[in-house]
Image (cartoon, grey):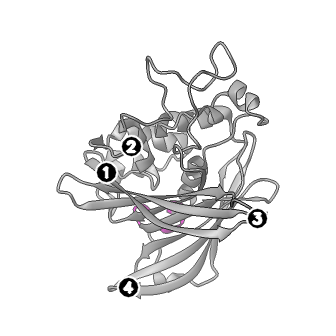
Amino acid sequence: MALRRSQLAVGQSHQEVVVENLTRTQIVMYAGASGDFHPFHSDERYARAMGLPGVFAHGMLTMGLTGKALSNFVGDGRLTHYAARFVSQVWPGDTLIARIEVKALREQAAQSLADLEITTRNQKGEAVLTGSATARIDA
Amino acid sequence: MAVERFPVEAGQILQFARALGDANPIYSDEAYARGTELGGIVAPPTFSQASQHFDPEFPLRPRPGRPWFGSAAEDKGPGAAPGSEGGGIGLYAEHRFVYHRHLRPGDVLHTRQHPGESWEKEGRRGGRLRFQEYVTEFLDAQDSLVLESIVVGVTTEKQVGE
Protein backbone atom coordinates (compact mmCIF):
# COMPACT_ATOMS: atom_id res chain seq x y z
CA MET A 1 0.00 0.00 0.00
CA ALA A 2 1.41 3.34 -1.01
CA LEU A 3 1.40 6.27 1.37
CA ARG A 4 -1.06 9.13 1.00
CA ARG A 5 0.11 12.66 1.52
CA SER A 6 -3.01 13.48 3.54
CA GLN A 7 -2.14 10.74 6.04
CA LEU A 8 1.55 11.67 6.37
CA ALA A 9 3.21 14.28 8.57
CA VAL A 10 6.76 15.54 8.85
CA GLY A 11 8.34 13.83 11.85
CA GLN A 12 6.32 10.65 11.42
CA SER A 13 8.50 7.54 11.58
CA HIS A 14 8.60 3.83 10.86
CA GLN A 15 10.85 1.41 12.71
CA GLU A 16 11.54 -2.20 11.84
CA VAL A 17 13.92 -5.00 12.82
CA VAL A 18 15.45 -5.91 9.45
CA VAL A 19 17.59 -8.80 10.70
CA GLU A 20 17.82 -10.58 14.01
CA ASN A 21 21.03 -12.37 15.06
CA LEU A 22 22.60 -12.16 11.58
CA THR A 23 24.01 -15.53 10.54
CA ARG A 24 27.18 -16.18 8.56
CA THR A 25 24.99 -18.23 6.23
CA GLN A 26 22.84 -15.20 5.40
CA ILE A 27 26.03 -13.28 4.54
CA VAL A 28 26.99 -16.19 2.24
CA MET A 29 23.50 -16.05 0.68
CA TYR A 30 24.04 -12.35 -0.04
CA ALA A 31 27.46 -13.07 -1.55
CA GLY A 32 25.85 -15.60 -3.88
CA ALA A 33 22.93 -13.35 -4.79
CA SER A 34 24.99 -10.20 -5.39
CA GLY A 35 28.08 -11.81 -6.89
CA ASP A 36 30.43 -10.09 -4.40
CA PHE A 37 32.56 -12.99 -3.14
CA HIS A 38 35.14 -10.95 -1.22
CA PRO A 39 36.61 -13.42 1.33
CA PHE A 40 36.15 -10.78 4.05
CA HIS A 41 32.49 -11.77 4.04
CA SER A 42 32.62 -15.57 3.82
CA ASP A 43 36.12 -16.80 4.66
CA GLU A 44 36.74 -16.80 8.41
CA ARG A 45 40.36 -17.99 8.03
CA TYR A 46 41.18 -15.21 5.59
CA ALA A 47 39.44 -12.53 7.70
CA ARG A 48 41.40 -13.57 10.81
CA ALA A 49 44.66 -13.71 8.86
CA MET A 50 43.92 -10.08 7.86
CA GLY A 51 43.68 -9.10 11.52
CA LEU A 52 39.89 -9.00 11.81
CA PRO A 53 37.89 -10.81 14.49
CA GLY A 54 36.15 -12.72 11.70
CA VAL A 55 33.92 -12.23 8.68
CA PHE A 56 31.62 -9.19 8.45
CA ALA A 57 28.59 -8.30 6.34
CA HIS A 58 28.77 -6.53 2.99
CA GLY A 59 27.81 -2.86 3.35
CA MET A 60 25.39 -3.54 0.51
CA LEU A 61 23.72 -6.29 2.55
CA THR A 62 22.96 -3.67 5.22
CA MET A 63 21.69 -1.33 2.50
CA GLY A 64 19.52 -4.13 1.10
CA LEU A 65 18.15 -5.02 4.53
CA THR A 66 17.36 -1.36 5.18
CA GLY A 67 15.70 -1.18 1.75
CA LYS A 68 13.27 -3.85 2.95
CA ALA A 69 12.07 -1.49 5.72
CA LEU A 70 11.86 1.38 3.21
CA SER A 71 9.64 -0.60 0.82
CA ASN A 72 7.49 -1.81 3.71
CA PHE A 73 6.95 1.84 4.68
CA VAL A 74 6.52 3.60 1.33
CA GLY A 75 5.19 0.73 -0.81
CA ASP A 76 6.74 -1.35 -3.56
CA GLY A 77 8.32 0.36 -6.54
CA ARG A 78 7.86 3.84 -5.04
CA LEU A 79 11.46 4.94 -4.47
CA THR A 80 13.04 7.57 -6.71
CA HIS A 81 16.29 7.93 -4.70
CA TYR A 82 17.99 5.85 -2.05
CA ALA A 83 21.39 6.73 -0.57
CA ALA A 84 23.35 5.10 2.25
CA ARG A 85 26.57 5.85 4.09
CA PHE A 86 28.32 2.89 5.71
CA VAL A 87 29.34 4.23 9.10
CA SER A 88 30.15 1.07 11.06
CA GLN A 89 30.83 -2.62 10.40
CA VAL A 90 28.04 -5.21 10.74
CA TRP A 91 29.04 -8.56 12.29
CA PRO A 92 27.46 -12.02 12.56
CA GLY A 93 25.14 -12.03 15.57
CA ASP A 94 24.06 -8.43 15.02
CA THR A 95 20.43 -7.42 15.16
CA LEU A 96 19.68 -4.39 12.99
CA ILE A 97 16.85 -1.94 13.43
CA ALA A 98 16.07 0.52 10.64
CA ARG A 99 14.35 3.79 11.47
CA ILE A 100 12.86 5.96 8.76
CA GLU A 101 11.62 9.47 9.44
CA VAL A 102 9.65 11.78 7.16
CA LYS A 103 11.72 14.97 6.76
CA ALA A 104 9.72 16.80 4.09
CA LEU A 105 6.64 16.50 1.92
CA ARG A 106 6.72 18.31 -1.41
CA GLU A 107 5.41 18.48 -4.96
CA GLN A 108 7.55 18.19 -8.05
CA ALA A 109 6.16 18.08 -11.60
CA ALA A 110 2.66 17.31 -10.26
CA GLN A 111 3.97 14.39 -8.22
CA SER A 112 3.80 14.25 -4.42
CA LEU A 113 7.09 13.20 -2.87
CA ALA A 114 8.25 12.32 0.63
CA ASP A 115 11.87 12.92 1.64
CA LEU A 116 13.02 10.43 4.25
CA GLU A 117 15.93 10.20 6.65
CA ILE A 118 17.23 6.74 7.51
CA THR A 119 19.32 5.40 10.38
CA THR A 120 20.00 1.71 10.89
CA ARG A 121 21.40 0.76 14.29
CA ASN A 122 22.72 -2.45 15.79
CA GLN A 123 21.59 -4.03 19.06
CA LYS A 124 24.03 -1.76 20.97
CA GLY A 125 22.40 1.34 19.53
CA GLU A 126 25.37 2.15 17.29
CA ALA A 127 24.53 3.54 13.86
CA VAL A 128 25.77 1.22 11.11
CA LEU A 129 24.11 3.02 8.19
CA THR A 130 22.79 6.53 7.74
CA GLY A 131 21.05 7.65 4.63
CA SER A 132 18.18 9.27 2.84
CA ALA A 133 15.52 8.36 0.33
CA THR A 134 12.74 9.96 -1.68
CA ALA A 135 9.49 8.18 -2.50
CA ARG A 136 6.51 8.94 -4.72
CA ILE A 137 3.38 9.15 -2.60
CA ASP A 138 -0.27 9.47 -3.51
CA ALA A 139 -1.90 12.88 -3.31
CA MET B 1 34.00 -2.35 -15.96
CA ALA B 2 30.85 -2.01 -18.03
CA VAL B 3 28.45 -4.93 -18.33
CA GLU B 4 27.34 -5.60 -21.91
CA ARG B 5 24.37 -7.79 -21.05
CA PHE B 6 22.55 -8.05 -17.71
CA PRO B 7 19.45 -10.19 -18.09
CA VAL B 8 17.08 -9.63 -15.16
CA GLU B 9 15.65 -13.02 -14.24
CA ALA B 10 12.84 -14.02 -11.86
CA GLY B 11 14.96 -16.73 -10.18
CA GLN B 12 17.77 -14.28 -9.48
CA ILE B 13 15.26 -11.79 -8.00
CA LEU B 14 13.88 -14.55 -5.72
CA GLN B 15 17.39 -15.46 -4.52
CA PHE B 16 18.28 -11.81 -3.93
CA ALA B 17 15.11 -11.22 -1.90
CA ARG B 18 15.78 -14.38 0.12
CA ALA B 19 19.31 -13.19 0.91
CA LEU B 20 17.69 -10.08 2.41
CA GLY B 21 15.20 -12.20 4.37
CA ASP B 22 12.47 -10.42 2.42
CA ALA B 23 9.36 -12.57 1.94
CA ASN B 24 7.44 -9.77 0.16
CA PRO B 25 5.44 -11.59 -2.58
CA ILE B 26 6.05 -8.68 -5.02
CA TYR B 27 9.49 -10.30 -5.62
CA SER B 28 8.32 -13.84 -6.32
CA ASP B 29 4.55 -14.32 -6.72
CA GLU B 30 3.47 -13.42 -10.26
CA ALA B 31 -0.26 -13.83 -9.55
CA TYR B 32 -0.05 -11.54 -6.50
CA ALA B 33 2.13 -9.00 -8.32
CA ARG B 34 -0.31 -8.82 -11.27
CA GLY B 35 -2.99 -7.60 -8.89
CA THR B 36 -0.90 -4.69 -7.57
CA GLU B 37 -0.40 -1.23 -9.10
CA LEU B 38 2.95 -2.49 -10.45
CA GLY B 39 1.19 -5.17 -12.51
CA GLY B 40 4.02 -7.66 -12.14
CA ILE B 41 7.12 -8.72 -10.25
CA VAL B 42 9.77 -6.05 -9.65
CA ALA B 43 13.27 -6.37 -8.22
CA PRO B 44 14.25 -5.13 -4.72
CA PRO B 45 15.77 -1.60 -4.63
CA THR B 46 19.41 -2.75 -4.46
CA PHE B 47 19.04 -5.66 -6.91
CA SER B 48 21.23 -4.06 -9.61
CA GLN B 49 24.22 -5.25 -7.55
CA ALA B 50 23.53 -8.69 -9.06
CA SER B 51 24.90 -7.29 -12.35
CA GLN B 52 28.32 -8.08 -10.85
CA HIS B 53 27.69 -11.67 -12.00
CA PHE B 54 27.67 -10.40 -15.59
CA ASP B 55 30.90 -8.39 -15.41
CA PRO B 56 33.46 -10.72 -17.03
CA GLU B 57 36.34 -9.01 -15.20
CA PHE B 58 34.68 -8.54 -11.77
CA PRO B 59 37.64 -8.86 -9.36
CA LEU B 60 35.65 -10.21 -6.39
CA ARG B 61 34.69 -13.51 -8.01
CA PRO B 62 37.13 -16.43 -8.18
CA ARG B 63 37.72 -17.73 -11.68
CA PRO B 64 39.30 -21.00 -12.83
CA GLY B 65 42.96 -20.69 -13.67
CA ARG B 66 43.41 -17.38 -11.83
CA PRO B 67 44.99 -17.02 -8.39
CA TRP B 68 42.44 -16.16 -5.68
CA PHE B 69 43.34 -14.26 -2.53
CA GLY B 70 41.04 -16.11 -0.11
CA SER B 71 42.00 -19.18 1.91
CA ALA B 72 42.49 -22.67 0.52
CA ALA B 73 45.45 -24.75 1.74
CA GLU B 74 46.78 -21.54 3.35
CA ASP B 75 44.90 -18.80 5.20
CA LYS B 76 45.65 -16.39 2.36
CA GLY B 77 45.78 -17.28 -1.31
CA PRO B 78 48.41 -16.13 -3.81
CA GLY B 79 46.13 -13.68 -5.65
CA ALA B 80 46.21 -9.93 -5.10
CA ALA B 81 43.30 -8.47 -3.11
CA PRO B 82 41.60 -5.47 -4.72
CA GLY B 83 41.83 -2.28 -2.68
CA SER B 84 38.42 -2.71 -1.11
CA GLU B 85 35.08 -4.27 -1.84
CA GLY B 86 34.03 -2.90 -5.20
CA GLY B 87 37.62 -3.18 -6.30
CA GLY B 88 40.32 -0.57 -5.91
CA ILE B 89 38.18 2.39 -4.91
CA GLY B 90 39.70 2.82 -1.46
CA LEU B 91 37.20 2.75 1.39
CA TYR B 92 33.62 2.12 0.26
CA ALA B 93 31.98 5.10 1.91
CA GLU B 94 28.59 5.52 0.33
CA HIS B 95 26.19 4.13 -2.27
CA ARG B 96 23.36 6.00 -3.98
CA PHE B 97 20.65 4.85 -6.35
CA VAL B 98 18.50 7.00 -8.63
CA TYR B 99 15.48 5.11 -9.96
CA HIS B 100 13.89 6.06 -13.28
CA ARG B 101 11.85 2.87 -13.15
CA HIS B 102 12.17 -0.40 -11.26
CA LEU B 103 13.76 -3.51 -12.75
CA ARG B 104 11.51 -6.34 -13.90
CA PRO B 105 12.11 -9.94 -14.99
CA GLY B 106 12.68 -9.93 -18.72
CA ASP B 107 14.62 -6.67 -18.78
CA VAL B 108 17.92 -7.02 -20.59
CA LEU B 109 20.12 -4.18 -19.44
CA HIS B 110 23.60 -2.92 -20.18
CA THR B 111 25.72 -0.45 -18.27
CA ARG B 112 27.75 2.66 -18.98
CA GLN B 113 30.29 3.91 -16.46
CA HIS B 114 31.89 7.26 -15.89
CA PRO B 115 33.59 9.01 -12.99
CA GLY B 116 31.28 11.42 -11.16
CA GLU B 117 32.21 14.35 -8.95
CA SER B 118 35.28 14.34 -6.76
CA TRP B 119 36.07 16.48 -3.73
CA GLU B 120 38.57 16.69 -0.90
CA LYS B 121 38.20 17.16 2.81
CA GLU B 122 40.66 17.54 5.65
CA GLY B 123 40.80 14.28 7.63
CA ARG B 124 40.32 14.37 11.40
CA ARG B 125 43.82 13.01 11.95
CA GLY B 126 45.48 15.13 9.27
CA GLY B 127 46.05 14.22 5.67
CA ARG B 128 43.51 14.89 2.99
CA LEU B 129 40.60 12.62 2.24
CA ARG B 130 39.77 12.36 -1.43
CA PHE B 131 36.22 11.39 -2.32
CA GLN B 132 35.45 10.09 -5.80
CA GLU B 133 32.10 9.14 -7.28
CA TYR B 134 31.86 6.24 -9.72
CA VAL B 135 28.62 6.35 -11.70
CA THR B 136 27.12 3.28 -13.38
CA GLU B 137 24.11 3.89 -15.62
CA PHE B 138 21.82 0.95 -16.34
CA LEU B 139 20.08 1.20 -19.72
CA ASP B 140 17.44 -1.02 -21.30
CA ALA B 141 17.30 -2.47 -24.82
CA GLN B 142 15.91 0.87 -26.09
CA ASP B 143 18.89 2.66 -24.49
CA SER B 144 16.56 4.36 -21.98
CA LEU B 145 18.07 5.11 -18.60
CA VAL B 146 16.53 2.80 -15.98
CA LEU B 147 18.74 3.27 -12.96
CA GLU B 148 21.84 5.11 -11.79
CA SER B 149 24.08 3.43 -9.23
CA ILE B 150 26.69 5.68 -7.68
CA VAL B 151 29.51 4.47 -5.43
CA VAL B 152 31.53 6.97 -3.40
CA GLY B 153 35.05 5.80 -2.59
CA VAL B 154 37.41 7.61 -0.26
CA THR B 155 41.20 7.44 -0.28
CA THR B 156 43.65 9.17 2.05
CA GLU B 157 46.50 11.15 0.59
CA LYS B 158 49.50 11.73 2.80
CA GLN B 159 50.86 15.14 1.84
CA VAL B 160 54.61 15.22 1.14
CA GLY B 161 56.43 17.27 3.80
CA GLU B 162 53.57 17.18 6.31
Q: Nearer the viewer, mark 3 or mark 4?
A: 3
Q: How far apart in space, not on screen, are marks 3 and 4 (Cα)?
A: 42 Å
- Per the model, the C-alpha gap separating discs 2 and 3 is 37 Å
What residue sits right under mark 3 in the picture? Answer: B126
Disc 2 to disc 3: CB gap under 8 Å: no
Magenta span contains residue B124: no
Mark 3: few, some, or many residues within 10 Å (few <14, many ≥20)?
few
- Secondary structure beneath label 1: strand
Residue B51's label in the rendered image is 2
Q: Earlier in the sequence, mark 1 or mark 2?
A: 2
Observer-side mark, 4 or 2, equals: 2
* Callout 1–callout 4 Cβ contact below 8 Å: no
On whether residue A75 falls in the magenta region, the answer is yes
What amino acid does circle 2 point to? Answer: Ser
Query: Residue A108 got which mark?
Result: 4
Same chain for the residues under marks 1 and 4 in the image: no
Q: Vertical placement of B48 versus A70: above or below? A: above
Disc number lying in front (3 or 1): 3
Seen at 39% across and 62% down, the residue is A77
Q: Which residue: 57% across, 54% down? A: A63
Q: CA distance from mark 4 to mark 2?
A: 31 Å
Q: Do the residues indicated by labels 2 and 3 lie within the same chain of the protein?
A: yes
Q: Which residues are magenta?
A: A71-78
Q: Amino acid at mark 4?
A: Gln
